[in-house]
Image (cartoon, grey):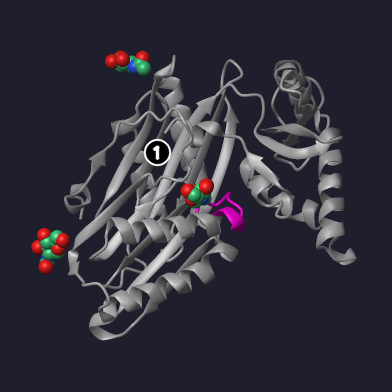
Amino acid sequence: MSSSFNIGVLLLFLFVQMVIGANPLYHFCSTNSGNFTTYSPYDQSLNKLLGNLHYKTPPNGFGMSSAGQYQAQTIGLSLCRGDVSSEVCASCFVNASTEIRKRCPNNKAATIWYDQCLLKYSSSNFFGQIDTEFKFYLLNINNVSDPTSFNLETKRLLSSLSNAAYADPRMYAAGVIDLEGSKKLYGLVQCTRDLSSGNCKTCLDNAISDLPSCCDGKEGGRVVGGSWRARFCSSGRPADILFFGWVGGKHACVDLTGVSPLVGLGSSAFTVGQAALKAVSGKVIKHEKACLDNHHVFIPFAFDTFGFLAPEAVDLLSRVQRVMHSNVMTPRSMDVVFKRLSFAIQKGVAAQLVARLPTISMYITCKHFTLYI
Ligand SMILES: *[C@@H]1O[C@H](CO)[C@@H](O)[C@H](O)[C@H]1NC(C)=O
Ligand SMILES: *[C@@H]1O[C@H](CO)[C@@H](O)[C@H](O)[C@H]1NC(C)=O
Ligand SMILES: *[C@@H]1O[C@H](CO)[C@@H](O)[C@H](O)[C@H]1NC(C)=O
């Protein structure tokens, strides 16, 4: 298997200056499953399959389906990145299904990758199997200043995300940690949900061990295959999330920090929340100016892994809760936000915490996820 794993491996050295969201990252027309002709039964099955997936994918971010019988049977799945809304997911799926038909017009099996989604189909049943036929790498060619410790932090973050993802029903995890010099390191890992959790872990661990060969000491990198994606990137930006039109029509920069409650404890007595509060005052000094310079409101959101939330975080969540309440929630579910968040908070995975706030228009501004590929 490890030898076939290398077949079709492509190393792309891309440095994309602009976000070209509408373009695929890559596509792969497989020749293993043969060809079909236009208007043949396989062609019709494929149209039906894409229709099914179009219907199934946006609500859950994932869909799998099959269509047709015998020689005309086709099997496919589509997956949206774990942090995109169902609207973006739907738009990405439409683009992917149009584009894959243009780019691989007669291949029975094909895969197309976008920043925000993946679509693949084949005439043979691949559900549950790790896709070893094709993978690619993308990286940001900028070098980090301290590659040894950066590589170590990257591996540490991605490994902890991989452990969170394979245990999660959505098979997705994203997170952010602080690095030296007010930089942040972002990570994201995801598997297609047809895999068992064991296979998801295997793929992600393979992807993470691949990163040094493509992206050693680089500011950002991705390894992408037919069943998984793993990526990291770093930056010194002022915010992790932008809430649009949050306060008086202004956008709010929300800076997420998860800290261990024992950080900075020293010999003094333990006070609940002290580490989170200290993190807030550090953050305000560091990032508020950059945010205000952009005419945004700055909200530090600090929590510790015992579940303590700094006052600014509680204000923010209360407001989120009111918006959710007035939009969709029943009175009984008033506490839902806090309850859902506590799980993510305990895991200390800040971006997951954001991903669990479903009804708010928000946007993780990890530009380097799309900007520097
Ligand atoms: C499939 O089509 C390609 C070009 O469109 C051709 O080169 C190839 O030989 C075909 N394969 C089969 C099995 O017919
Ligand atoms: C889909 O394509 C349209 C038109 O090119 C583009 O505006 C849109 O951003 C694309 N959607 C996604 C999610 O890439
Ligand atoms: C990064 O480092 C490599 C090797 O040290 C060097 O060849 C390359 O030019 C550097 N890249 C940039 C963008 O500075």
Residue 334 counted in the magenta span: no
In the image, taking residue 158 as reference, residue 127 lies left or right, namely: left
Q: Nearer the viewer, residue 103 or 163?
A: 103
**Residue 135, x across and y down, in percent:** 29, 48
Q: Quadrant of residue 317?
A: top right
Quadrant of the snapshot with the C terminus: top left
**Residue 353, x across and y down, in percent:** 67, 46
- Name the residue rendered at 73%, 54% in the picture: 359
Stretch in magenta: 80-88
Label 1 C-beta lies within 8 Å of the nearest ligand 2 atom: no
Crowdedness near tag 1: few (<14), some (14–19) or many (≥20) residues, C-alpha within 10 Å: many
Is 3 located above or below residue 367 in the figure? below
Is 153 located above or below residue 2 in the figure? above
Residue closest to the far front: 39
Residue closest to the far bottom: 69
In the image, taking residue 325 as reference, residue 172 lies left or right, namely: left
**Residue 271, x across and y down, in percent:** 83, 30
- Name the residue rendered at 44%, 34% in the picture: 155
In the image, taking residue 183 as reference, residue 68 lies left or right, namely: left
**Residue 133, x across and y down, in percent:** 24, 55
- Name the residue rendered at 45%, 55% in the picture: 95
Q: Quadrant of residue 238?
A: top right
Q: Nearer the viewer, residue 162 or 14?
A: 14
Mark 1 highlights which residue?
222
- Any part of residue 202 in sight: no
- Name the residue rendered at 76%, 34% in the picture: 251
| Ligand 1 visible in quadrant | bottom left
Quadrant of the snapshot with the N terminus: bottom left
Is 182 located above or below residue 194 in the figure? above
What's the residue type where badge 1 is placed?
Answer: Arg
